[in-house]
């Protein structure tokens, strides 16, 4: 075993370089102008020294200590120290009662954060936690982050300022985002699962269905959203009852339908692959022992294909959460509304207010469904 | 690919080129989509030029991601890079949860509007499938084959060059093709940050409520993706012996 | 009793099973032997209607098998195949319990039966019941496969190359176990194999199939001494035809009265092994001892040689 960890060297070196060359905090006179860097040491000397000390320890651990537990712990402490130092700087820099100035984390902050995040991720990966532990870790981490943000300590940071302005809308868009992503997934599962079973049985149908769905997948999302607008608008016009139900050419309806269409391929495809991998001997034996076709499907084929099907569902959910952001372009709402509004106003904080929750949501969905897949996998791959 | 499938692809290619070169000839096809005499064919720019710019953006990004991803994939599967392998795997998984819009949105403040943030987003997004497939391809080489290579006296470089890479090429190319298809679609979103591409046509359609524009942009992009994917596979089967079947 | 009556199976132009008729006596083991593509598996699979015949019929104890739904018929017939088809997501106990549960047995009865079968196949229930198939060795998996086929106490057991995946030593053991079970429960067993030695070793009767046709269905000795077809002669008669014939007869069956000087051999030893023993000892005759160890007669080298010559 080598004494020096190469990954640790790379991370420590990048972090140190970022600390010396790039600012940890930037001060902006308002939310749109570019920021000017501020030195942490001048603003909050104690917190800054504590941070530098913590980071030095983390770097030493990353380079010399192999134990994943210790590496994880120091990385987490480093992240906390980084957040606290930047938040205290924001507190000092913001004049009381001023709602215009913005104090944002600088490029140095993000790079050090990424380096520490990678160190923690690497340690977690090496610990190889089981599915339940992974979900528990995620829940604890999310809860701790939410509690920290809710404490008010970080309220002077620019993104939290942006959040404070948009708090009610944020809750609304979050709800809309989840509803669109999960609703289209639910509808897709209901259709795609039976379709996948049929495709497994009928090779001809399989080629046709997968061919069509593959083509659907290549249509760029904004185009598919747009293409669906016209017929939906026409339908709403022709059937006022549908319009009364909320169907219209713009907004959630075309987005939901487009997401539904995109969701079909991974689920149908993975159902077909999963069922195809079930050992023919097991199915033959089941038939030979007198299981009916329905019993074979329910008791043998679907349970054995379940991990593969769940993998498809994970792909769809992660993909949907990402695609919903684009739905904002056609008035579908969701976190994308903040992103595109932010791009329009060149307000990076607003962009991040939309982008970060989207990533967190997609990542959490991926962790949870991965864990579920592992739990259903009784048979080694 | 069967002869009929090949003929179908060539027909699609012909149709696509014809549309891009002489779009007005197709006006009757798209006219019924619009009411009140709105233009049936995109009229705010040259479709051919936009398509080429779109394609160029995707190809540049894909070339860069291929070089970087394959190099990284090789590095983490060598003894020298072994310490990076577990993290790389996790990063590939985490990276796939980043929506393209988020990557794009984060790139804008770094490099401003225009082609640059789109290129960065396409590059970053294109890395993942290629990197993942490079690792998978290199790791799927059968151990007896590697042992035989060692037994024949190849050094590490010769083994990589003559045995591992050729065996991994089909999977690597699969990753490149996937990456291309994803990026042809993702590049349309680049138009929201002022990159020149077919997204412009779609967004112009969305803004002016012109379904014909949206359909044109979408169709051209989708056909380009399909043709790129199949064309790549055809080239592979022709020139890379291990890619056949 | 199973009566197979003019059974045919055609797929389009090709005839896989061609007008096969045979009668299988209850409580016997019949082996069906043939090359791959001879139609032997299809014939077997038509008995429990995994394959529906194109024409002809199968009678099970006088009743046409098409009289009830196929899945109900199959629950009464044990079925074990090569590669076993154990359900990888179910424990050993759950695998074995499949058919009893389908038949609606009570939970206690099912678990008692599972325990009984595991013990019968020398698998400690405490250790193996909760294991998954991939945690077992090949031989253990094979025993679980047969145990599962026997779980609902079927009168008839169909086996398609059940020992195909086993290495020779375990294979011999598995064959012995099967013979033991067949004798103990009187199950009617039909076993398909491509291995002529296995067919001879296990079968009370051996059916030889080629290109969809049943060439001969008879006692093993008859196949050696009176092959009905050149193919049968070719299949059974390589250079060791006489030794094969000798291996079908035990010393007890042919012992003459009287005791001779020479080695003692068990009554259950095949004449082939007695011959080997005599060659080894340089003796001209051997004393045959019965199950209790008392001499019951003798066999001479000359009589063994004379029997071996019947193969001609």
Image (spheres, coloured by chain):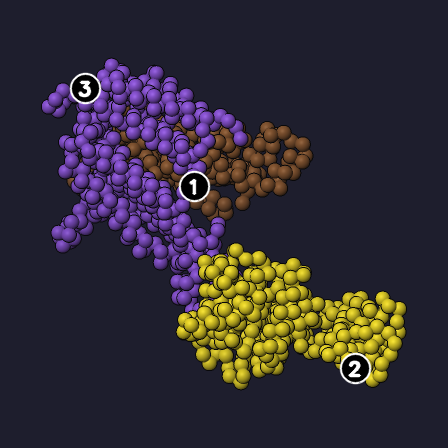
Residue matched to label 1: A128
**Residue situated furthest top in the rendering:** A42
Please, which chain is the residue tagged with disc 3 on? Answer: A
Residue matched to label 2: C296
Q: Can residue C300 be seen in this view?
A: yes
Chain in purple (letter): A
Badge 2, how many Cα within 10 Å: few under 14, some, many 20+? Answer: some
Badge 3, how many Cα within 10 Å: few under 14, some, many 20+? Answer: some
Q: Residue C263 carries which label?
A: none
Badge 1, how many Cα within 10 Å: few under 14, some, many 20+? Answer: few
Q: What element carries label 2?
A: strand
Residues at marks 2 and 3, CA–CA distance in whole angstroms? 112 Å
Classify the position of the C terminus of chain C by image quarter. Answer: bottom right
Q: Is residue A319 left or right of residue A177?
A: right
Q: Is residue A359 above or below residue C42?
A: above
Please provide percent x and percent y for residue B211. 23, 40
Please, which chain is the residue tagged with disc 2 on? Answer: C
Residues at marks 1 and 3, CA–CA distance in whole angstroms? 42 Å
Please provide percent x and percent y for residue B82. 50, 32
Q: Is mark 3 on a helix, strand or loop?
A: helix
Looking at the rendered structure, the number of numbered marks drawn on it comes to 3
Q: What element carries label 1?
A: loop
Closest to the camera, between mark 2 and mark 3, is: 2
Classify the position of the N terminus of chain C by image quarter. Answer: bottom right
Q: In this view, does A17 lie above or below B103?
A: above
Residue matched to label 3: A93
Q: In this view, does B138 lie to the left or right of B198?
A: right
- Chain C: drawing colour: yellow
């Amino acid at each position: 075993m080598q004494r020096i960890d190469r990954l640790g060297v790379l991370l420590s070196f990048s972090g140190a370089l970022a600390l010396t060359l790039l600012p940890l905090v930037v001060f902006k006179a308002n939310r749109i102008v570019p920021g000017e860097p501020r030195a942490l040491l001048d603003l909050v000397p104690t917190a800054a020294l504590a941070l530098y000390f913590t980071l030095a320890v983390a770097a030493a651990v990353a380079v010399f200590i192999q134990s994943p537990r210790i590496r994880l712990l120091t990385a987490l402490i480093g992240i906390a120290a980084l957040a606290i130092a930047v938040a205290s700087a924001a507190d000092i820099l913001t004049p009381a009662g001023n709602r215009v100035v913005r104090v944002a984390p600088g490029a140095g902050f993000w790079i050090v954060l990424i380096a520490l995040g990678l160190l923690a991720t690497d340690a977690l990966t090496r610990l190889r936690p089981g599915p339940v532990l992974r979900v528990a870790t995620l829940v604890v981490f999310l809860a701790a982050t939410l509690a920290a943000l809710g404490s008010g300590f970080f309220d002077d940071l620019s993104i939290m300022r942006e959040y404070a302005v948009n708090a009610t809308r944020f809750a609304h868009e979050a709800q809309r985002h989840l509803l669109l992503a999960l609703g289209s997934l639910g509808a897709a599962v209901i259709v795609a699962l039976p379709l996948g079973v049929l495709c497994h049985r009928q090779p001809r149908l399989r080629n046709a269905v997968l061919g069509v769905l593959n083509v659907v997948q290549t249509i760029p999302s904004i185009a598919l959203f747009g293409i669906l607008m016209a017929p939906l608008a026409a339908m709403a016009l022709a059937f006022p009852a549908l319009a009364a139900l909320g169907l219209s050419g713009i907004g959630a309806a075309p987005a939901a339908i487009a997401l539904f269409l995109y969701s079909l391929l991974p689920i149908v495809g993975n159902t077909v692959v999963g069922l195809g991998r079930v050992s023919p001997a097991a199915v033959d034996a089941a038939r030979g022992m007198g299981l009916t076709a329905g019993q074979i499907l329910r008791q043998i084929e679907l349970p054995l294909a379940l991990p593969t099907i769940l993998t498809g569902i994970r792909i769809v959910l992660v993909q949907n959460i990402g695609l919903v952001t684009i739905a904002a372009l056609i008035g579908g709402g969701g976190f994308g509304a903040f992103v595109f509004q932010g791009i329009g106003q060149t307000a990076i904080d607003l962009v991040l207010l939309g982008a970060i929750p989207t990533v967190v949501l997609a990542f959490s969905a991926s962790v949870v469904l991965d864990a579920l897949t592992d739990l259903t996998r009784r048979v080694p791959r | 690919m069967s002869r009929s499938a090949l003929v179908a692809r060539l027909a699609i290619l012909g149709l696509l080129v014809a549309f891009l070169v002489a779009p007005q000839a197709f006006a009757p096809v798209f006219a019924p989509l619009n009411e009140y005499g709105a233009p049936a064919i995109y009229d705010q720019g040259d479709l051919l030029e936009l398509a080429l710019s779109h394609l160029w953006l995707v190809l540049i990004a894909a070339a860069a991601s291929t070089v970087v991803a394959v190099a990284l994939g090789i590095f983490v599967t060598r003894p020298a890079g072994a310490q990076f392998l577990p993290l790389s795997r996790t990063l590939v998984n985490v990276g796939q949860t980043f929506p393209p819009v988020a990557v794009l949105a984060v790139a804008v403040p770094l490099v401003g509007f225009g082609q640059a943030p789109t290129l960065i987003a396409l590059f970053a997004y294109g890395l993942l499938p290629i990197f993942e497939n490079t690792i998978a391809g290199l790791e799927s080489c059968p151990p007896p084959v590697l042992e035989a290579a060692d037994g024949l006296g190849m050094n590490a470089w010769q083994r990589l060059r003559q045995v591992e890479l050729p065996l991994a090429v089909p999977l690597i190319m699969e990753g490149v093709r996937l990456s291309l298809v994803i990026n042809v679609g993702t590049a349309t979103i680049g138009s929201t940050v002022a990159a020149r591409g077919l997204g412009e046509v779609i967004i112009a359609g969305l803004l002016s409520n012109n379904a014909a524009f949206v359909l044109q942009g979408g169709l051209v992009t989708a056909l380009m993706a399909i043709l790129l994917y199949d064309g790549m596979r055809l080239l592979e089967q022709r020139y890379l012996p291990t890619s056949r079947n | 009793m199973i009566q197979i009556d003019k059974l045919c199976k055609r797929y389009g132009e090709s005839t896989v099973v061609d007008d096969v008729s045979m009668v299988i006596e209850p409580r016997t083991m019949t082996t069906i032997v043939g090359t791959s593509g001879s139609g032997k598996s299809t014939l077997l699979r038509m008995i429990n209607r995994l394959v529906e015949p194109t024409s002809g019929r199968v009678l099970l104890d006088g009743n046409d098998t098409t009289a009830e739904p196929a899945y109900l018929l199959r629950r009464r017939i044990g079925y074990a195949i090569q590669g076993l088809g154990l359900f990888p997501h179910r424990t050993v106990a759950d695998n074995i319990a499949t058919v009893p549960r389908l038949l609606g047995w009570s939970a206690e009865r099912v678990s008692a039966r599972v325990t009984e079968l595991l013990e019968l196949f020398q698998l400690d229930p405490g250790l193996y019941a909760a294991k998954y198939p991939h945690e077992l060795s090949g031989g253990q998996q094979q025993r679980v496969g047969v145990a599962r086929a026997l779980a609902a106490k079927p009168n008839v057991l169909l086996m398609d190359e059940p020992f195909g995946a086993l290495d020779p030593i375990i294979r011999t053991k598995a064959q012995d176990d099967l013979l033991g079970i067949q004798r103990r429960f009187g199950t009617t067993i039909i076993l398909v194999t491509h291995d002529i030695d296995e067919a001879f070793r296990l079968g009370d009767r051996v059916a030889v199939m080629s290109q969809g046709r049943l060439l001969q269905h008879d006692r093993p000795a008859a196949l050696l001494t009176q092959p009905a077809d050149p193919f049968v002669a070719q299949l059974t008669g390589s250079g060791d035809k006489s030794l094969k014939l000798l291996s079908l007869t035990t010393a007890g069956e042919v012992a003459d009265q009287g005791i001779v000087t020479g080695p003692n051999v068990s009554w259950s030893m095949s004449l082939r092994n007695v011959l080997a023993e005599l060659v080894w000892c340089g003796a001209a005759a051997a004393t045959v001892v019965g199950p209790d160890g008392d001499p019951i007669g003798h066999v001479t080298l000359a009589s063994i040689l004379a029997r071996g010559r019947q193969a001609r």
